[in-house]
Image (tube, rainbow, N blue to C red):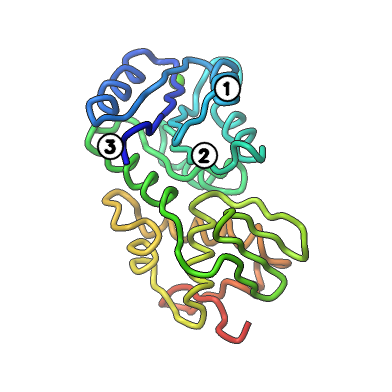
Amino acid sequence: MLMNTKILVVEDEKDISSLISYNLSKEGFEVSVSSDGEDALRIIRKEKFSLIILDLMLPGIQGMELCKTLKSSEETSLIPIIMLTAKSDELDKVLGLEMGADDYITKPFSPRELIARVRAVLRRTQEKPAAEKILKIGDLEINSDTYQVSKRGLPVKLSATGFKLLLYLVRKKGRVFDREMLLNAVWKNEAYVEPRTVDVHIRRLREQIEDDHSHPLYIKTRRGIGYYVDGEL
Ligand code: CA
């Protein structure tokens, strides 16, 4: 799996990008480094990467803007992005509608945490679901081959994690899952994900697929337990 797994690190602080690049290379990943947003965009449009590690604070195009650009462009929207943030309270913004990153790492971080996160995100996004290709539920159509979702024929752009989460809940519709179960299923026992991350992703999913996200039709809440997709849909 590690063969030809190319990772781009976008970070202007040399000692941090060297630390990341050293540790990823040691694990067998092929690593490219870029120190500013514009340069990164140019590289990403030329080469294929399996993952991007993107710092929030960059000269030129900011990390936030770059993340949004990548997630809203068809060719790059499925490349998983791990954001480096200085403060954990930026979490909502980073994983939310505004940016749509797949995960985040708060500085300072240990090489062990970095590697664990990278592996978990790659595992999550590279796994190909085996079952039916197109699932229809209400006005939604979910294609598990192309990772595309449409609603009433119009494309809905989800992050790789958002897609996984939706697909999982739809495939097991009618069953209620608590946060822990969803973490195990979608985040695959990743050591550093908090249950709150599930809520952030559910909220974002609702904002994207529901007509009225405060009265969800697709992803329902079972108070005190967790989330489910209505089995009657
Ligand atoms: Ca920086």
For label 1, the residue is: 46
The disc, 1 or 3, on the residue closer to the chain's N-terminal end is 1
Instruction: Say which amino acid is labelled 3.
Output: Ile
SS type, badge 2: loop
For label 3, the residue is: 115
Instruction: Say which amino acid is labelled 1.
Output: Lys
Q: Residue at x 50, y 73 (%)?
A: 171
- Looking at the rendered structure, which numbered label has been put on residue 156? none
122 w.r.t. 70: above or below? below
- What is the quadrant of the C terminus in the image? bottom right
Mark 3 burial class by Cα count in 10 Å: few <14, some 14-19, many 20+ = some
Q: CA distance from mark 1 to mark 3?
A: 25 Å
SS type, badge 1: helix
The extreme top residue here reads: 14
64 w.r.t. 206: above or below? above
The disc, 3 or 2, on the residue closer to the chain's N-terminal end is 2
For label 2, the residue is: 79
How many circles with numbers are drawn on the protein?
3
Instruction: Say which amino acid is labelled 2.
Output: Ile
SS type, badge 3: helix
* Residue behind label 2 places its C-beta within 8 angstroms of ligand 1: no
Q: Residue 128: x, y in percent?
A: 45, 56
The foreground one among 201 and 34 is 34
183 w.r.t. 14: above or below? below
232 w.r.t. 132: above or below? below
Say whether marks 1 and 2 touch (CB < 8 Å). Answer: no
The foreground one among 232 and 126 is 126
Mark 1 burial class by Cα count in 10 Å: few <14, some 14-19, many 20+ = few
Q: Residue 7: x, y in percent?
A: 41, 29
Q: Residue at x 49, y 62 (%)?
A: 165
Q: Residue 60: x, y in percent?
A: 60, 16
